[in-house]
Amino acid sequence: MKIQAKDLRIGNFVTIENAISWLYLKGIPMVVIGVDEILDLRKTVSFPFSKYSIRLEGEEGTKYSQFDQFIQPIKVNEEWLIKLGFIKDVDTSFRWFLLEESIAYDLDDHCIRISDSWEFGKRKYVHELQNLIYALTLSDAKL
């Protein structure tokens, strides 16, 4: 799945998947630190599917810039839920994780429950979950 640049917020976690350069960065989580529209179309001749340059920060503060066609989402898993502040609900046989008392994530169905409603759709990727947490709490997920 390719991420749309409009869906990215500063602080979202993504990864690079570029078969031409930075192969060693494949699968390594990076933080979005900027999204810039490419105004000089000559820069996109070799990369016609990119309209944005995504600025990223990796481990130890190393900075990168990558065309948006090479930015990939990170799938939500138990490790990421815990990093985002969720706690495993041990009172149920389901794989539910809780963030605050009224927000739960079902790892099997990738659904969010808020209070008693499951109407918030599926969130399979870390950046989508980060954006929803921000929309609901007006604060970034704590890492």
Image: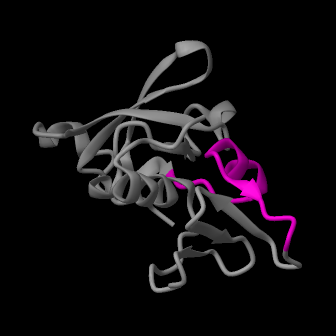
Quarter of the image that includes the C terminus:
top right
User: On the image, which quarter does residue 74 sit in?
Assistant: bottom right
Q: Please state the extent of the stretch shown in magenta in the rendering.
A: 72-91
Residue 139 lies within the magenta run: no
Q: Residue at x 33, y 57 (%)?
A: 7
99 up-or-down from 46: above or below: below
User: On the image, which quarter does residue 110 sit in?
Assistant: bottom right
Q: Residue at x 72, y 63 (%)?
A: 97
User: On the image, which quarter does residue 126 sit in?
Assistant: bottom right
Residue 90 lies within the magenta run: yes
63 up-or-down from 77: above or below: above
Q: Nearer the viewer, residue 108 or 69?
A: 108
**Residue 44 location (% of width, % of height):** 24, 44
Q: Residue at x 61, y 56 (%)?
A: 99
**Residue 102 location (% of width, % of height):** 55, 67
**Residue 68 location (% of width, % of height):** 37, 48
